[in-house]
Image (tube, helix red, strand yellow):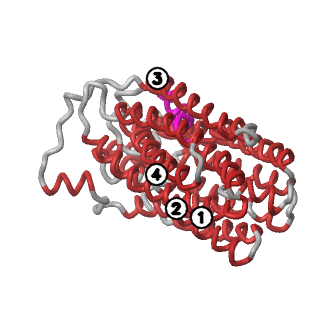
């Protein structure tokens, strides 16, 4: 996008303009002179409908289920689960993002995938809760990955569809704070470590209730009047393949996000076992520790997330705060490396909470700013979003390999630091966004 041109035109006007430019938006600044509060509320609920329940179920309750079924093979089971789930999510995110771009229905182009995905996701939670073997549980989560990524790819594109460039920082903040608030669901899930089946049922209910609220708030209308995709080689290439023109910064943002999530995954994926097998807490102490660390991360993430988004709109800065926040995600991992105590994980929670709050608040706006083509926003944002799933394959392989090689969870912390630092460098290399 011609960010520099937009910045020059903005300097001639008294009204503040975000660093995003018109080509990435279906709504212009003139068409949306006031902040769309209702849409922002819907975006806030978005991650809570899929990421919150799925993350809590997959990263908290399922490892406990594995521990109950096969204590000796739990680490390998988690690694296998994450790998299969991430591969399924990678494919699903791309496919459903592309399909939602070209879908024309009386309910809009995103809503059918959101509603269908959430219903299937909830039903699969019930299936997983009653599965008796590790292969059945993994198969269930693979299917969840398809459903959740149909939802995720469609939801994330709503910002491009419905939000004008001038409000992108604030809207991204709402999405990011919602993402941070997913930790509330993690706290709730951690209270069910003694009864993970009941916890899975509750997560299914949370997903459906919040999903209904999201759909009502977004109130997507019919898009039957939108032009349909032409069936020709150029259109197929544009809508169903990787972007190839004017996409340098887009791929830097993609790679930076991937490394950022890999760095966080190295620690986050094994947080339950870090408390039990590295810090050596019993089950009750672990429940308290996970809840405490998550609460700390939640509060700091919300506070700094709420601050960061509006400031990004006001000052027109996205790249630097995103890159710096990624650096601090790595810095957070230094403390539990040197100090294998619960308090060090709490420090990790404070620093990573602040960093993730800033990152989650602004990253969405940065992604929109580097989009090559607004007409393929669902597919292109889906590709960026799949960094959240692809990175789990890489992060799991790295963390699992390190744990196996060194025989300790301690080694995952320096790996997290180095990977996060590399991700920050990629964000700094982006040129057309300040």
Which is more toward the observer, 192 or 215? 192
Q: Which of marks 2 and 3 is in front?
A: 2
Label 4 sits on residue: 385
Label 3 sits on residue: 217
User: Mainly helix, strand or loop, the magenta region?
Assistant: helix
Q: Residue 83 carries which label?
A: 2
Q: In this view, does 85 lie to the left or right of 403?
A: left
Q: Based on the displayed image, in which of its 4 quarters is residue 336 positioned?
A: bottom right
Which is more toward the observer, 248 or 107? 107
Callout 2 secondary element:
helix
Residue at 70% from the left image edge and 68% from the top image edge: 412
Q: Is residue 323 left or right of residue 233?
A: right
Q: How many labels does the image show?
A: 4
The crowd level at tag 2 (other Cα within 10 Å; few <14, some 14-19, many 20+) is many
The crowd level at tag 1 (other Cα within 10 Å; few <14, some 14-19, many 20+) is many
Q: CB under 8 Å between callouts 2 and 1?
A: yes
């Amino acid at each position: 996008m011609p960010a520099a041109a937009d910045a020059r035109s903005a300097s001639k006007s008294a009204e503040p303009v975000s660093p995003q430019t018109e080509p990435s938006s279906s709504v212009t600044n003139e068409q949306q002179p006031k902040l769309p509060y209702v849409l922002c509320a819907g975006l806030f609920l978005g991650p809570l409908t899929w990421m919150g329940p799925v993350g809590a179920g997959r990263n908290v309750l399922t490892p406990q289920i594995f521990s109950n079924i096969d204590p000796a093979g739990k680490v390998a089971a988690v690694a296998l689960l994450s790998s299969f789930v991430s591969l399924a999510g990678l494919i699903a995110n791309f496919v459903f993002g592309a399909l939602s771009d070209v879908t024309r229905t009386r309910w809009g182009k995103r809503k059918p995938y959101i509603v269908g995905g959430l219903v299937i996701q909830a039903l699969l939670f019930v299936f997983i809760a009653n599965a008796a073997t590790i292969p059945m549980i993994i198969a269930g989560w693979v299917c969840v990955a398809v459903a959740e990524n149909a939802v995720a790819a469609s939801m994330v594109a709503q910002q491009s569809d419905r939000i004008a460039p001038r409000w992108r920082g604030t809207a991204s903040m709402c999405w990011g704070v919602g993402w941070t608030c997913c930790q509330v669901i993690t706290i709730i899930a951690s209270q069910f470590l003694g009864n993970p089946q009941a916890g899975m049922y509750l997560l299914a209910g949370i997903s459906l209730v919040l999903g209904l609220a999201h759909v009502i708030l977004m109130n997507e209308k019919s898009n039957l009047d939108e032009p349909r995709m032409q069936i020709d080689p150029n259109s197929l290439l544009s809508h169903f393949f990787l972007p190839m023109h004017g996409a340098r910064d887009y791929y830097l943002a993609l790679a930076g996000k991937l490394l950022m999530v890999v760095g966080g995954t190295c620690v986050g994926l094994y947080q339950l076992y870090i408390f039990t097998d590295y810090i050596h807490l019993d089950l009750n102490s672990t429940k308290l520790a996970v809840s405490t660390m998550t609460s700390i991360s939640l509060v700091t993430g919300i506070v700094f997330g709420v601050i960061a988004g509006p400031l990004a709109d006001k000052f027109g800065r996205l790249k630097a705060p995103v890159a710096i926040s990624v650096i601090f995600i790595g810095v957070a991992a230094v403390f539990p490396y040197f100090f294998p105590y619960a308090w060090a994980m709490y420090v990790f929670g404070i620093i990573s909470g602040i960093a993730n709050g800033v990152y989650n608040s602004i990253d969405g706006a940065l992604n929109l700013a580097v989009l090559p083509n607004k007409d393929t926003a669902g597919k292109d944002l889906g590709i960026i979003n799949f960094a959240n799933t692809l990175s789990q394959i890489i992060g799991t392989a790295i963390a699992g390999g390190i744990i196996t090689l060194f025989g300790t969870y301690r080694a995952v912390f320096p790996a997290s630091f180095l990977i996060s630092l590399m991700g920050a460098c990629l964000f700094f290399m982006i040129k057309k966004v300040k």
